[in-house]
Image: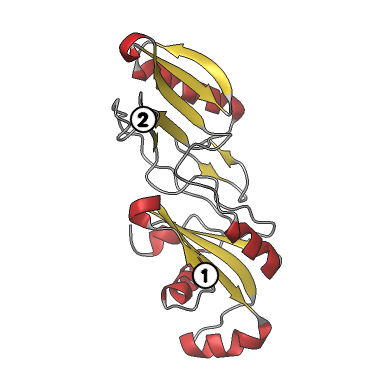
Amino acid sequence: MSGPGRYAHNRDPRLAELLHEVTEQGWGNDSGGYLDEDGFHASLLIVEPAEQQELSEAFDRDIPVGNWILTQDQQGLVTVDQYPTAAAARHAFDHLPDLDAPGEEDGTITPAGPLGSQYAVALAGSFLGYADDMDQAIGMLRAAMDADRYCPDAWFISDHGNPTASTSGRRDQAPGSAAGLGTARAVVPLVGLRRDGSDSRVPTCSPRGGRRPTCR
């Protein structure tokens, strides 16, 4: 995705686009993650009062003082989280979640039974039950997420124990923001989940307020 639409889910899309341009031009304080390998790219941007004028003159636009983490996913969506202090932003950046494995609140679908004849379904560490096929497994996971009004990431765990994220992009739980610009990932269309974990039909939702994502 390119153009203004990639910023529309932020509380201030114009500011999100401007801050992204600043980091793209190499003015960010730090960066991490690779889209191809990790499914996300994050940038830390801290604008101190002493450097605001220089930065604003460089871009010929008013760059506000503030502390942000910008996260881009594989769909091209750029999510901006604002933090009250530089220390808070740095701490959050240094503790970005491991995106290569399920988090403790994520949902999982794992082959079970003889030759993977069933699927074990779990959400946030709680076992939901066994499903006879993938459609039923996805339905169980969707129902549990809908009941909780909470949509974390969902993963397919192969019979060899290899996790594959159901969403192509960084974890839906973007870094939390105490004073955030609004911070959500867009809803991703639901597609078919094959047994090898490529693609999925599990629900993907948008976090509201930079904290727990809520289903739509």
At a point 30% along the width and 35% down the height, the residue shown is 198
Q: How many marks?
A: 2
Where is residue 162 shown, x and y percent of the image? Answer: 38, 33
Residue annotated with mark 1:
30
- Residue 201 falls in image quadrant: top left
Q: Earlier in the sequence, mark 1 or mark 2?
A: 1
Residue annotated with mark 2:
201
Residue 31 vertical placement versus 155 (above, below): below
Outermost residue, front side: 160
Residue 198 vertical placement versus 80 (above, below): above
Q: Amino acid at mark 1?
A: Asp
Where is residue 1 shown, x and y percent of the image? Answer: 33, 57
Q: Is residue 81 left or right of residue 71?
A: right
Residues marked 1 and 2 touching at CB (< 8 Å): no
Foreground residue among 11 and 131: 131
- Helix, strand or loop under label 1: strand
Q: Amino acid at mark 2?
A: Arg
